[in-house]
Amino acid sequence: MNDISGFYVVTVRQHRERRVVDELAAVRVFAYMPAQKKLVRHARQTKEVVKALIPRHLIVWIDDEVDYHTTRNTADVVGYLRLPDQYGVLKAWRIPTEQVLELNLYEQMGEFDVTPYRSELQVGQAVEAICGKWQGHRMTLNAIKPDHRASVTMTLFNSKPSQPFEMDVRHLRAA
């Protein structure tokens, strides 16, 4: 393996990204987990958590064959992300440094949100729920909040609007 130094993508077991980064740091191998802050709602509680931007994958700097094998033999590491070269031989994928720096800058700027709300929806528009207990029901969109919540009202059987209630805007589409 000549000229092995560079950034590589490593596949790890599910939800073990942070643990692998810590284990590699203990043996002096630089590992980077692109992350994003995400609001998680559960049981009427909202908390902010840090999640991996690319689930099950880390970016690792490899200097020599020792780092290459140390990384591969770390617990919870499945292997290197491999792509075919010009001859069709599968080889570990080496990422250009510029792409890693670009990814890091976007993450720091907070521009990564893998679940953007549906920007085609407009306030006052008729919408339809596409999942959940209100699936198939038509509603009127009152407001879209930045945390992916939408305030909606339904028209009841007596033609009066219901009290406004909140839904996840990702569960709505234009009617």
Image: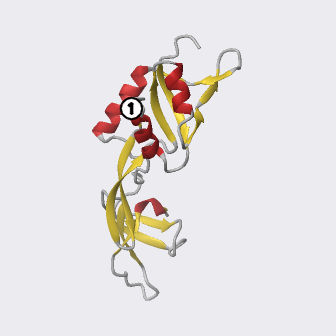
**Viewer can see residue 72:** yes
The three-letter code of the residue at mark 1 reads Leu
Image: 156 above or below 75 = below
Q: Position of residue 86 (x, y in %)?
A: 66, 15
Crowdedness near tag 1: few (<14), some (14–19) or many (≥20) residues, C-alpha within 10 Å: some
Q: Which quadrant of the view contains residue 46?
A: bottom left
Image: 152 above or below 97 = below
- The residue positioned 59% from the left and 35% from the top of the image is 79
Q: Position of residue 48 (x, y in %)?
A: 32, 57
Q: Position of residue 125 (x, y in %)?
A: 39, 63
Q: Position of residue 70 (x, y in %)?
A: 52, 30
The image's colouring method is: secondary structure
Q: Nearer the viewer, residue 13 or 124?
A: 13
Image: 124 above or below 77 = below
Kindly state the secondary structure of the residue where label 1 is placed: helix
To which residue does mark 1 refer?
A: 103
Q: Nearer the viewer, residue 62 or 94?
A: 62
Residue furthest right as drawn: 88
Residue furthest left as drawn: 109
- The residue positioned 31% from the left and 42% from the top of the image is 110
Q: Nearer the viewer, residue 114 or 133?
A: 114
Quadrant where the N terminus is found in the figure: top right
- The residue positioned 43% from the left and 84% from the top of the image is 156
Q: How many marks?
A: 1
